[in-house]
Amino acid sequence: MIKIEMLRCFSTVAQTGNLADAAMRMGRTQSALSMTLKQLEEHLGQRLFENERKNRLTPLGQEVFRFAQQQLRQFDDTVQAIEAAARAPQGLLRVASIPSASGLALPSAIETMMQRHPALNLELRDMDSGRVVDAILQGQADLGIVSGQPVLNGVESETLFEDAFGLLCATGHPLAQQPQPPDVDAVFASGFIRNSLCGLIEAPEIRAALPRARITVHNTHSLLAMVRTGKWVTILPRSVARVQPTELTFRPIAGLEEQRSVSLLIHTRTQFPQLVAEFADILRHSPWTG
């Protein structure tokens, strides 16, 4: 049987590339780590390292390392959630949200909830939509706010708000200054950066132009930082521009009428269902679009 500590031992050795550093990090002896690795390899029937120095993984070792990292993160998150729940007898609310929502109505919604329940513990995670979905499905979050309208087993989903896609650029950028809305060709000729939300756009002219983008940025903070320099532009929903209204300008794109849906995800099985339902109701009635 593979135990979680076997995976932790293997992952630590794989990260450090030797038994000595791994043993120091884990507070164990090298012989103990070596024995644990031997047990894991015997269970699998194959070697995980190419040599005794433990500095190169076999193809199987690379796969095991990838899966082990996923399981260790999930296990550690679960332990933290259990300990947090034990420390929060008055309730624990775990929220995962796309970054743009954190700059809109989410802070005021959290403030309202905390005023109603002064002893409540609340955890907020900022992440992209895919990771929000993962957190919900893995039981690491009670509520999630995502772009799009995912259908998930055991999760209730409803639309919070919709906002239009358009050009996002620095306030001093030429496309921000011209009187008429820029067209798709002008946008993609101005140092366009692709982002994950572009995949939600169905407009044929956008889909045809996306392969021309030479830069893709997945992290919202990094994306906005690059756009603020005035050297690049991107396409994002209007609500994102509200996060930094003095530095960024949102403009409609000629011929682009699509909107981004932002959905509320509610896990149907949570430790504090009444708190989850109450916070969900606060979110429904929050001024997301200003």
Image (cartoon, grey):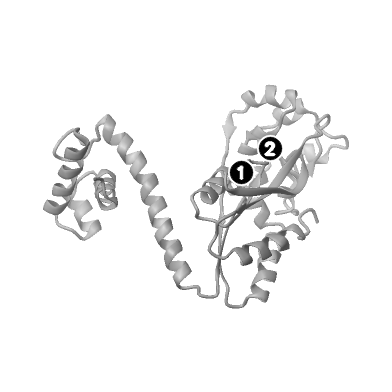
The residue furthest bottom is 118
- At mark 1, the secondary structure is helix
Q: CA distance from mark 1 to mark 2?
A: 8 Å
| Residue drawn at 30 percent across, 35 percent down | 62
Residue 256 or residue 186, whichever sits in front: 256
Residue 269 position in % (x across, y down)? 55, 56
Residue 77 or residue 277, whichever sits in front: 277
| Residue drawn at 24 percent across, 32 percent down | 58
Residue beneath disc 1: 223
From this view, report whether residue 74 is shown above or below residue 59.
below
Q: Earlier in the sequence, mark 1 or mark 2?
A: 1
Is the C-beta separation of discs 1 and 2 under 8 Å?
Answer: yes
- At mark 2, the secondary structure is strand
> Does residue 94 appear left or right of residue 67 in this picture?
right
> Does residue 69 appear left or right of residue 279 in this picture?
left
> Label for residue 258?
none
Residue 67, by quadrant, is: top left
Residue 81 position in % (x across, y down)? 46, 62
Residue 276 or residue 209, whichever sits in front: 276
Classify 10 Å Cα crowding around label 1: few (below 14), some (14-19), many (20 and above). Answer: some
Classify 10 Å Cα crowding around label 2: few (below 14), some (14-19), many (20 and above). Answer: many
| Residue drawn at 42 percent across, 67 percent down | 83
Residue 248 position in % (x across, y down)? 73, 48
Residue 183 position in % (x across, y down)? 80, 29
From this view, report whether residue 211 is shown above or below residue 248.
above
Q: Amino acid at mark 2?
A: Thr
Residue 227, by quadrant, is: top right
Looking at the rendered structure, the number of numbered marks drawn on it comes to: 2
> Does residue 7 appear left or right of residue 134 in this picture?
left
Q: Amino acid at mark 1?
A: Leu
Residue beneath disc 2: 234
